[in-house]
Amino acid sequence: MSSVVGTFRLLDVLKAEQFPLPDHCRTVHLEMGADQAFILHYEVMVTDENLIKLGRALQRLGQEPR
């Protein structure tokens, strides 16, 4: 019987291979298209220590001219 191939454990195997991922990375998605580069999308949990930095970055984004 054949099994379905997927990337369900991608985050775990990337960590096992010491692939560079940001701290507090929660999930990773791999995008593969015909004639396109592979793209990794990841989610990072916002922690207490980086919440203030995120808030300041969003303020700066709103203040800078477009």
Image: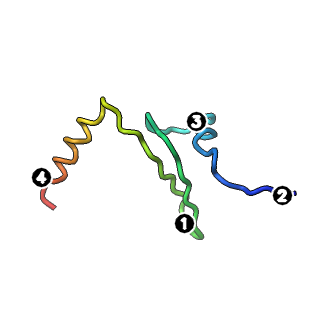
Which residue appears at 63% of the width and 40% of the height? 13
User: Counting other residues with Cα less than 10 Å from the Cα at mark 4, is it few (<14), some (14-19), or many (20 or more)?
Assistant: few
The residue tagged with tag 2: helix, strand or loop? loop
Above or below, comparing residue 24 to residue 8 in the picture: above
Label 4, on which residue?
63
Distance CA(mark 2)–CA(mark 4)? 55 Å
Label 1, on which residue?
36
Query: In front here: 60 or 37?
Result: 60
The image quarter in which residue 62 lies: bottom left
Contact check, label 1 and label 3, Cβ < 8 Å: no
Contact check, label 1 and label 2, Cβ < 8 Å: no
Counting from the top left corner in percent of width and height, residue 21 is at 49, 39
Label 3, on which residue?
15
Q: Say whether disc 1 or disc 3 marks the residue closer to the N-terminus.
A: 3
User: Counting other residues with Cα less than 10 Å from the Cα at mark 3, is it few (<14), some (14-19), or many (20 or more)?
Assistant: few
**Mark on residue 60?**
none
Counting from the top left corner in percent of width and height, residue 37 is at 54, 61
Q: Amino acid at mark 4?
A: Gln
The residue tagged with tag 1: helix, strand or loop? loop
Contact check, label 4 and label 1, Cβ < 8 Å: no
Q: Amino acid at mark 2?
A: Ser
Contact check, label 4 and label 3, Cβ < 8 Å: no
Which residue appears at 22% of the width and 44% of the height? 57
User: Counting other residues with Cα less than 10 Å from the Cα at mark 1, is it few (<14), some (14-19), or many (20 or more)?
Assistant: few
Q: Say whether disc 1 or disc 2 marks the residue closer to the N-terminus.
A: 2
